[in-house]
Amino acid sequence: MTTVSHEPSVKPLIERAGAYLPPAKIKLIESAYEFAAEAHCNQKRLTGDPYIVHPLDAAMTVASLQLDAPVIAAALLHDVQEDCGVPNAELNKRFGADVARLVDGATKLDKIPWRAPGERPGEQSVQAENLRKMFLAMAEDIGVVIIKLADRLHNMRTLDAHTPEKRLRIAQETMEIYAPLANRLGIWQMKWELEDLAFRYIDPERYKAIARQIHAKRTVRERYIREVEKILRDELSQHGIEAEVTGRAKHIYSIAQKVDRYEEQHKSFDQIYDLLALRVIVKSVGDCYNALGVVHGLWHPIPGQFDDYIASPKESLYQSLHTTVMAIGARPLEIQIRTEEMHQLAEYGIAAHWQYKEGAPRNGRAEERMAWVSQLVEWQREMSGEEFVEGVKTDIFHDQVFVYTPKGEIKEMPAGSTPIDFAYRVHTDLGHKCVGAKVNGKLVALNSPLQNGDMVEIVSGKSSRGPSRDWLNPNLGYVKTGHSKEKIRQWFKRQERAENIERGRDVIEKELRRFGMTLSECQDEVLKIFKLDSVDDFLAQLGYGGISAAGIPGRLAPLVRKDDEPVLPAIEGPAPRVSSQTVKVLGTGDLLTQIGRCCNPVPGDKIIGYVTRSRGVTVHREDCFNVLHEDEKNRLVDVEWGRSDATYPVAVHIEAWDRVGLLRDVSTIVSEDKVNMLGVRTEHGDRTTSVYLTLETTGVQQLGRLMAKLETVRGVISVTRQLDGSRRASGSL
């Protein structure tokens, strides 16, 4: 797709910057534009536009945040060093050290490409290197990252010019890194637009469907919001509170997230009433709380839907009161209350503290609140590429909760953090010595998620026995943050190599045993998958947690043994029909597909399709007995897993010591993991029992997690996944 080339004008940028900058600083921007326009004069974008359109748009975004002239100038010049060969020394000479430093920082962030879709988790060193550079640059000057966000925003606005594959890759990295970064910095304007644009390319059908549904109900919603606006504005006026009350539309991606949450509660799109929210902007902090009282006096507040971010600001410095009430028509309505200064911070985030204010000193509080960047730069030096990427996404790009130490100090933790994460956040030694925890004065399990406002007290042992290896098992949920995981890994890494090898051997043999395999049978394939040269190196890394045991089921699924698998007695259960969204038949249009009952593949397994004479395409595992012994090979077609929330039946065999309550405990674990049990059968032996389950799972990852939990049930000897061998007959495809 191309657009008609047009001659860009710097006038809108000058007008926007001139609204808050003095004329002397405007001259720097004009000079930077002239230099950039000349440097890019012979270059075109894929859209057909002159190249200067791109840096000009990035500079407009920076100016909308009201940043100083050097940052705007650097946005205009951010591509001349790399794309036009202009030395940084020349930029320093022409525009000063500040501009040259910002351009150099932005250029370095572009040097290394990001991870491509489908890249294995162990190959994240390139992505980690780019993240490291970004955070190092951010620690030196926030302007570098704001320029990078502005650059990405315009690239997303013009993404149609790229190939479908490149559009998807850029959209995915935008959703994974850039939108969360804008959110962490509190730049809401950038966050929502980056999310919506990325969502449009990642899931175009769903994006269009939600957009159509929003448009269909727009008139009704707008009439409703005007009505509640007037009621609240009049009520505030009667109480002597001067306020600006406006409706705020929710954005398509945030609505998609809300739809997902509603579907979990079995509610439809038509039941989502809070697609619009009210924003109330008042004069002072006191007026915020007075306005909250007026709102709650007017409409009944919904329990558990109030957040005070004024008393406890977010790490991005965001402040506001959030409440949800049952407004007219008994419809839920979200209301945000803040001052004008808070509103500026909500819109511009951390950039608001770097905004140009002539003669004003740099905001010390903002620099103090950005200490998390320096902290991240410090501990990332000790982490491998994969661990660093994982840590950034959990510790930095995740929703936060605020908890208190016994002395009343506030600690901000990623949502889902546990008491062990809290202990490591306070001090590494406290984490190593943690043996228990009290939350709000009550003893809790160490894998209990912390909630906003919890007061956490860590019970420590007198001697440093060190952490438990179970803490690194994500299936058990003991630690959430990358920081905690890295400290635990470091502790185990310092232990004897022989001990780590032995522990790693226990872990891998247990994982392989679930799938009917041994390490000696597949050690060459395992080393190839994990890119290691020796079995001992692999076992040692597995032993101290350098390789996560949780990822093993998905990585080793293609190696599951074939013809010599033990036969599992059949448990009848429905073979689900799957839509073309669940399984894609390559090279053809929509075809009816269904899961083969003989091998019951799940997402994560390598699969192949078999064209039947009357029932569409049957999907089998590539190593299915019937596929391997099929005579008509021309009826086999390539298929791949698509996007779907479907579930798949899987046969699981549990061997355990016989005892009262065993089946009850197994059922409890299965139900807690939200897995449906289609069938169950038991066989009793001498003091032991075999439990045969047919479970509906979403894929290998969920299955591996559930099997790990089942192994913790008292008396369980082994848990294995097996094929239903009773249907191994020629022609049963």
Image (cartoon, helix red, strand yellow):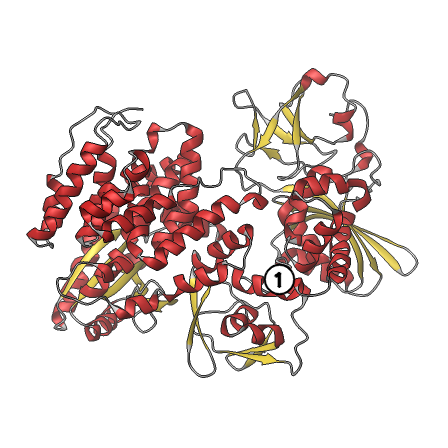
Closest to the observer: 216 or 73? 73
Q: Is residue 311 above or below residue 577?
A: below
Q: Residue at x 27, y 37 (%)?
A: 86
Q: Residue 499, how many percent across, how many down?
A: 76, 62
Look at the image and tell me in which quarter the N terminus lies.
Answer: top left
Residue 587 position by quadrant: top right
Q: Residue at x 14, y 71 (%)?
A: 241
Outermost residue to the right: 686
Q: Which residue in the structure is indicated by mark 1?
A: 489
Closest to the observer: 175 or 295? 175
Q: Residue 367, how many percent across, how many down?
A: 31, 66
The answer to whether residue 370 is left or right of residue 391 is left
Look at the image and tell me in which quarter the C terminus lies.
Answer: top right
Closest to the observer: 432 or 560? 432
Residue 317 position by quadrant: bottom left
Q: Is residue 61 visible?
A: no
The answer to whether residue 152 is left or right of residue 660 is left
The answer to whether residue 651 is left or right of residue 230 is right
The answer to whether residue 515 is left or right of residue 118 is right
